Amino acid sequence: MSKQGETQYMNDYGDGMQLSTIASIRKRPGMYLGGTDFFGYIQYIVSAFDLLLDHDATWIELDIGKNLHIASDANIQVYINAENQLQPFEAFESLGTNQDVIDGAILTALSDYLNVVISDGSSETRLQYKAGERQIFEQHSAIGSEPGIKMHFAPDPAVFSVTNASPTVLQSYCSRTVCLHPGVAVRIKLGDNIIQYYSEKGIEDLFTAIATPYQILHQPINISESKGELKVQAVFAFHSWSENHIWSYANCGRVPDGGTHEAGMLNAISQFHSNLQNSHPVGVGILAVLAIEYPDVTYKGCIKSRIGNPELVDLVDELISRGIERWIANHSEEAEHLRRIERFQFALFW
């Protein structure tokens, strides 16, 4: 959800009373999804994935038909808060950092119907909603049942102008998402066909896919460092031409326009490159995947296209520089190869 959406939730009032979470989302869905057309519809489906991933899912299976069926081993606990709302499907637990709660409320509010069955191995919870209104809430004993969650839902046509899309959109999303959640298997069912997406190496696998059209000049440099609440992962390599191509992520979300975290990484790589080449710069470009985890990310723009935290420039610079030093210590021979790289001359072949 956008920062605008969070602010709007706090400011929404009707008849002198603060709106419920569900009513606030239904009143201004675009504040929470970025729109109610194609993009908003895709973001609505992604909310289901985020809900499961934030609850420690190790597998997710999506059956794409006329409506949507999704199952997972995610561990979701449903409970009633002080306002008699069921979390995480009817209310925010808190604003800003608990995206799982926001995603559950989005699904409830913006679905034509939402049916949920959750089991923990000893009990079962059954929920049904219609256009954001709770129809059924049941809990009963279910000893020996398989732990997990099943959801059956469809977007509300009174909210969305687009209510379906090519399965290719979700296939593309899943192939990228598993690289940001290594060890999680995602399966998409299309009729009798099942396609599974899985990444063991995380952003290393993403870098390999991204680097395919380019001629890289050395073994990619893989970095994983942390300081306080900031965790930085990066894979980068110099390639045979001069332009930079960087794919940035923050808290598992794409940051297409980069920002201060990216500036910090480029500072560190630039210094590394300068040290390698001494006074003989060679003008090669950089291919990189950068992923950070940071609870206090501040975005610029309502669609979270750019990160603006000024402290991240120096913090990411420090962590990337530290990671490069570790890599050099463990790859001394490859580091020597780096001293001899240069930009290639014939685009026809390279």
Image (spheres, helix red, strand yellow):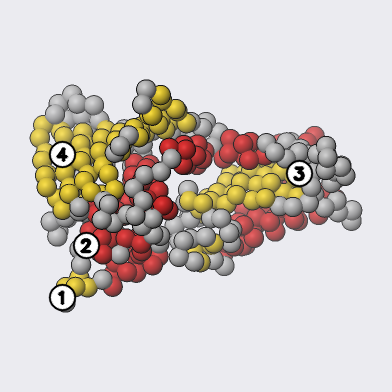
Q: Earlier in the sequence, mark 3 or mark 2?
A: 2
Q: Earlier in the sequence, mark 2 or mark 1?
A: 1
**Distance from Cα at disc 2 to Cα at disc 1:** 13 Å
On the rendered image, what quadrant is the N terminus found in?
A: bottom left
Q: Which residue is mark 1?
A: 15
Camera-nearest label, 3 or 1: 1
- What is the three-letter code of the residue carrying label 1? Asp
Between the residue at mark 3 and the residue at mark 1, the CA separation in whole angstroms equals 61 Å
42 sits left or right of 259 in the view: left
Residue 288: % across, % down: 65, 47
Residue 126 bears which disc, if any?
A: 4
Image x and y of residue 77, in percent: 23, 43
Is 335 in front, or is 213?
A: 213
| Residue sitting at x 80%, y 34% | 333
Please provide percent x and percent y for residue 44: 35, 50
Mark 2–mark 4 CB contact (< 8 Å): no
- Residue ID at (29%, 48%): 155
Q: Is residue 269 left or right of residue 71?
A: right
Task: Indicate the quadrant where residue 76 lies.
Answer: top left
Instruction: List x then y, in percent, for residue 56.
Output: 36, 39
* Marks 4 and 3 close (CB-CB < 8 Å): no
